[in-house]
């Protein structure tokens, strides 16, 4: 699949809230694939995105549950957050009905998207996070075709 770069931005943890406010309009209603090494801040970025959407309750990583579902008072809709780190075979995703979450116009955020081949959604957005220093990251948003 080819990709088209939409945005590149360097940021620090102090700037993450502003970064998320600028990203949100581009991500809502999309399937978003997150690519980054361990410790780069995928979950931190997603937590802030969800906070900016006025989510009820505590936002946590779904590393062990694989899926967390949140209701946003801001957009009056559900957002699905997957963490595929523990998935060993893509076939395991059929057991949780993963493909059903890809239907429709709801926002789906998927960490460790490199584990997807067959279930990789078409026309998804990709967020790559690169560690540039201890306190600095570079985020790249692109569109998959």
Image (cartoon, rainbow, N blue to C red):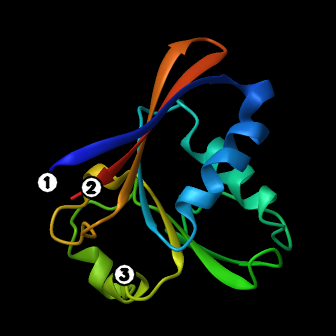
- At 23% from the left edge and 47% from the top edge, which residue is drawn? 3
Secondary element under disc 2, as helix, strand or loop, is strand
Residue 45, by quadrant, is top right
- At 76% from the left edge and 85% from the top edge, which residue is drawn? 76
Tag 2 or tag 3, which sits nearer the N-term?
3
Q: Is there CB contact under 8 Å for labels 2 and 1?
A: yes
Q: Which residue is mark 3?
A: 98
Q: Residues within 10 Å of mark 1 (few under 14, many from 20)?
A: few
Residue 69: where, in percent of width, then height? 63, 78
Secondary element under disc 3, as helix, strand or loop, is helix
Q: CA distance from mark 3 to mark 2?
A: 19 Å
Is 51 displayed left or right of 10 in the figure? right
Observer-nearest of 12 and 57: 12
Task: Using the image, tell me which numbered label, if any, was put on residue 1.
Answer: 1
Residue 109: where, in percent of width, then height? 50, 63
Q: CA distance from mark 2 to mark 1?
A: 7 Å
Tag 3 or tag 1, which sits nearer the N-term?
1
Q: Is there CB contact under 8 Å for labels 1 and 3?
A: no
Quadrant placement of the C terminus: bottom left
Q: Residues within 10 Å of mark 3 (few under 14, many from 20)?
A: some
Quadrant placement of the N terminus: bottom left
Q: Which residue is mark 2?
A: 144
């Amino acid at each position: 699949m080819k990709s088209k770069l939409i945005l590149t931005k360097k940021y620090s943890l102090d700037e993450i809230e502003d970064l998320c406010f600028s990203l949100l309009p581009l991500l809502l209603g999309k399937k978003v694939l997150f690519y980054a090494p361990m410790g780069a801040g995928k979950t931190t970025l997603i937590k802030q995105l969800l906070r900016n959407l006025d989510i009820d309750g505590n936002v946590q990583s779904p590393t062990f549950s694989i899926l967390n579902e949140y209701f946003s008072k801001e957009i009056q809709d559900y957002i699905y957050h997957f963490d595929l780190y523990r998935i060993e075979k893509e076939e395991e995703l059929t057991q949780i009905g993963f493909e059903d979450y890809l239907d429709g116009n709801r926002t789906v955020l998927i960490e460790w998207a490199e584990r997807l081949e067959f279930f990789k959604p078409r026309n998804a957005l990709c967020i790559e996070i690169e560690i540039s220093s201890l306190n600095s990251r570079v985020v790249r948003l692109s569109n998959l075709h």
